[in-house]
Image (tube, rainbow, N blue to C red):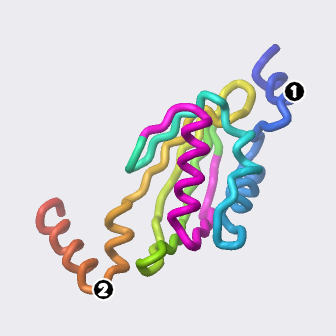
Amino acid sequence: MNSLDKQESTPYCIKDVETLKELWTKTYNTEGKPDWSHILPYYDDNIYFRDSIQGISGIDEFRAMTERLSQRSKDLKMKVVRASKQENIFFVEWEMTISYKKNPSSVLYGASRLTLNEEGKIVEQRDYYDLWGDIFDNIPRFGKAYRRFMKRKFG
């Protein structure tokens, strides 16, 4: 059985860019709180997730992380800017607007690389974004000071 045959026999398999965009849009653009229940079956039990904050292994840890994110934010939306696929890897560019309980809303600009296994399930997800810069930009006076510091030290 080749990998295409395995994908055809797996009910939760991501076959194309349009399916991925539909799943992600549905996840984040609900009534303010993200809902991963429909997309979690598309993740392999051995998912490895990595972003600017953490590395997580396994579907149970991944599910717990999604629940924490939902609890911490009062409103979370995502706009998929573009997506592409090459072989078994998807790249998704996104803009996430997140409102925390006590701070102004922030837009995080980022991208995700999703690697699919032979069954068409996500076995690895790597998210890339500038967490602090995008959040600090929305804090009056602090954002400009942070950008001046970054430019002086690293620019």
Where residue 24 sits, quadrant-wise, is: bottom right
Neighbor class of circle 1 (other Cα within 10 Å; few <14, some 14-19, many 20+) is few
| Amino acid identity at mark 1 | Ser
Q: Which residue is at the far top?
A: 1
Residue at point 73% right, 50% down?
A: 37
Neighbor class of circle 2 (other Cα within 10 Å; few <14, some 14-19, many 20+) is few
Left or right relative to 140: residue 24 = right
Left or right relative to 111: residue 29 = right
Percent position (x, y) of residue 112? 53, 49
Vertical arrangement, residue 23 with respect to residue 75, above or below? above
Where residue 121 sits, quadrant-wise, is: top right
Magenta stretch: give its range: 55-84
Q: Secondary structure at mark 2?
A: loop
> Which residue is tagged 2?
140
> Which residue is tagged 1?
9
Q: Are marks 2 and 1 in contact (CB under 8 Å)?
A: no
Percent position (x, y) of residue 45? 65, 30
Vertical arrangement, residue 6 with respect to residue 132, above or below? above
